[in-house]
Amino acid sequence: MSDARSDIFARIREALKVKAPKPHLKGEPVAGKTSAVAKPWLPDGGESADASLAILAEQLAKLKAVLIRVPDQAAAAKAVAELATAKNWQKVAYHGHPLLRPVAAALPCEAWEADASFEKQKLEGCDAGLTTCESIVAQLGAILVSSASSGGRALSILPHVHVVVAEAGQVVPDLGSALALAKARHGDQMPSMLSFITGPSRTGDIERILVLGAHGPKELYLVLVG
Amino acid sequence: MDDSKAIFLKDATVNAADGDQRAFIRKALGGYYTNRDLQKARYRDWERARDAASMAKWSAVNDLANVLEKFVGNFERNGGVVHWARDAAEARAIILKIAEDNQAKAIVKSKCMTSEEIHLNDALEKAGFGVVESDLGEFIQQLRGEAPYHFVFPCMHVKREAISELFTKHLGTAPTDSPEELTMIARRHLRQLYVDADIGITGANFLIAETGQISITENEGNARLTAALPRIHIALSGIEKVVNHLDDLSVLLPMLATAGAGQPMTCYNTLYSGPRKKGECDGPEQFHLVLLDNARTRILADPEQRDALHCIRCGACLNVCPIFKNIGGLAYGTTYQGPIGSVITPHLRGLKQWNHLSGASSLCGACTDACPVRIDLHHHLLHNRRNATKESPTLFDQVFHHGFNFVIKRPWLFATGGRIFRATLPLLQKLPIPYMGAWMKTRDLPKAPAQSFRDQWKNQNV
């Protein structure tokens, strides 16, 4: 296959011998990091923590994700337990994380630490998946999960409901900040999966009518502590 | 006339006359326009954001050799395996070999237009591998045995009654007219397939050189499941999808969603670097990436149209195109429909057979205005028309252009010709004029003015 590789590179180098003009822009091109350059043009993510939280709440509501704000860990455990009772969950899978173990322990139903003894068929049968996250993007209402923060790849997508427990300090204003944070935290040892989750799974494939719960979770809860 | 052109003209004529279907498509797109405008309004300067998106792609495409090399180095360092395919046949052979080497029993796929481009499903099925499309729209199109109608909304032309019938026939489910219930039928049917499949095939929306990650954009969660549960993940991507920095996604991901689907971001935007890492509990054991040229370097070699490689496949140009809305996606007969398809298909499959698509445009420029990465779409359609005429001019082109050239250089001849033309115009209306039949069928010629423009200008200035 090295043959195809060198052929393709030869074609590319040959093609690029002729320079292309810059695109027709509205303004002058600005040098610098894309997110810094585009920040004043993109949707607002808030200049203060409070402003960001307000934007986040608005975005999540539009996305039909549910935001539950609680003052402390104990209240978070109570809120998730109430959800489990209200929704009649029988089995909840959770990521083995210090923030989540007390929440799982307070559940009124079976709780299974999925990443300790992973089994995909068993996970498919769970009502809800409980994870932490890397960060939360106010600007877009997006929650960044990773294979490191969320018990692998499947826990945040396979169960019918996804519950994220996070701290208010994890909210960042915009997408650029979330990407920079992930890079700073993991360097060149990125988790094998990083996923921005923007609301419950959805499709508009039938007559462009919105339906929630296409293949992933039908419901998404963000329990924000602090 | 070439086959592709004859089929295009026939289908376009039939579809344009189908008022019901056109109204259905308009209605389906109505919600998109509303949502897109609402989301665009959240941008503090959408036009400048388009500048940033355009420059992010421009800088990668115009330094493709270096950026691609860097990407591949990082991708391999993360534990992935890169395969190179000069054309569709090589890409199919690579994927078939992976399936054979691993004795795959079941393959699940998430939406990937590049796989449509190389006709991957046909090849897998002929080799005896079962393959199931998991994106709802693609799943429906696979059951219908039909190509996608729109490369983002594959079955937007199919009414719910037809989908219900299709599911009853293939899955044995009870009829329903609820889009929600239909979605749940597909959800229940596909869930076990993810668990059972041993190979998951996905596309890639962006390849990030800086980190060696691939980025996949979707709404349903089917790509997430496809890349999570099977033991082998194969991604297929064109070489032009590469961008320099992870940070470039801070503009590209939201704009892709807003331009293409009227969303702030699509539901899942996922970055993959390598197979399951040490200490991770799930994820594939092998991660393969097939990088495809398939004439992309031909577009790259045309500096005038190189920006067509900026395309992030959002579909915005289709959604606003008056031609697409009237003739529908299937009439194009291409993998990529609408304005971007009309621009790149002649490069991918030959200008001679596909130049008719350059005419499938009113040159209104709505596509160029809608493009989040500022591809000069409608001018490229003109460029293709010019190139086709240069490459293989028809007899009409030759006679007409030489004749025009001869007359325009001789003012006396031009004036005399004009006088004769004005005098005989009423006659022309009644005569069959060669080459003008299709135009004349639905139009009347205007009344000839008494004076030529040149005469009017002269008199006015007196």
Image (spheres, rainbow, N blue to C red):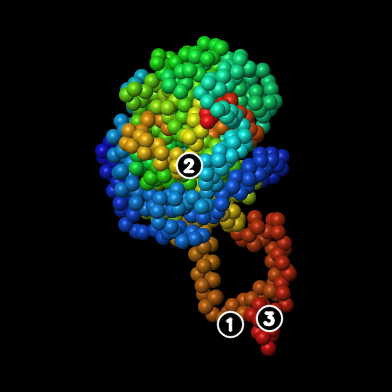
Q: Look at the numbered disc 1 and give the secondary structure of its residue.
A: helix
* Count of numbered circles in the view: 3
Quadrant hosting residue B73: top left
Residue type, numbered disc 1? Trp
Q: Are discs 3 and 2 less than 8 Å apart at CB?
A: no
Residue B40 placement (x, y as % from top left): 59, 48
How far is disc 1 from disc 3 in space, using C-alphas? Answer: 16 Å
How far is disc 2 from disc 1 in space, using C-alphas? Answer: 66 Å
Quadrant hosting residue A58: top right
How far is disc 3 from disc 2 in space, using C-alphas? Answer: 61 Å
Task: Name the mark on residue B412.
Answer: 1
Residue type, numbered disc 2? Leu
Circle 1 or circle 3, nearest the eye:
3
Give the mark nearer the N terminus: 1 vs 3.
1
Task: Name the mark on residue A175.
Answer: 2
Quadrant hosting residue A184: top left
Q: Are marks 1 and 3 on the same chain?
A: yes
Q: Is residue A149 visible?
A: yes
Name which residue lies at 67% across and 42% down: B30
User: Residue at the bottom extreme?
Assistant: B462
Residue B36 placement (x, y as % from top left): 61, 45
A226 horizontally vs A6: left or right:
right
Q: Is residue B123 visible?
A: no
Task: Name the mark on residue B456.
Answer: 3
User: Label 3 lies in what chain?
Assistant: B
B369 horizontally vs B440: left or right:
left
Q: Look at the numbered disc 3 and give the secondary structure of its residue.
A: helix
Q: Are discs 1 and 3 less than 8 Å apart at CB?
A: no
Label 2 crowding class (10 Å Cα cut-off): few <14, some 14-19, many 20+?
many
Looking at the image, residue A15 lies above or below residue A127: below
Residue A154 placement (x, y as % from top left): 46, 23
Circle 2 or circle 1, nearest the eye:
2
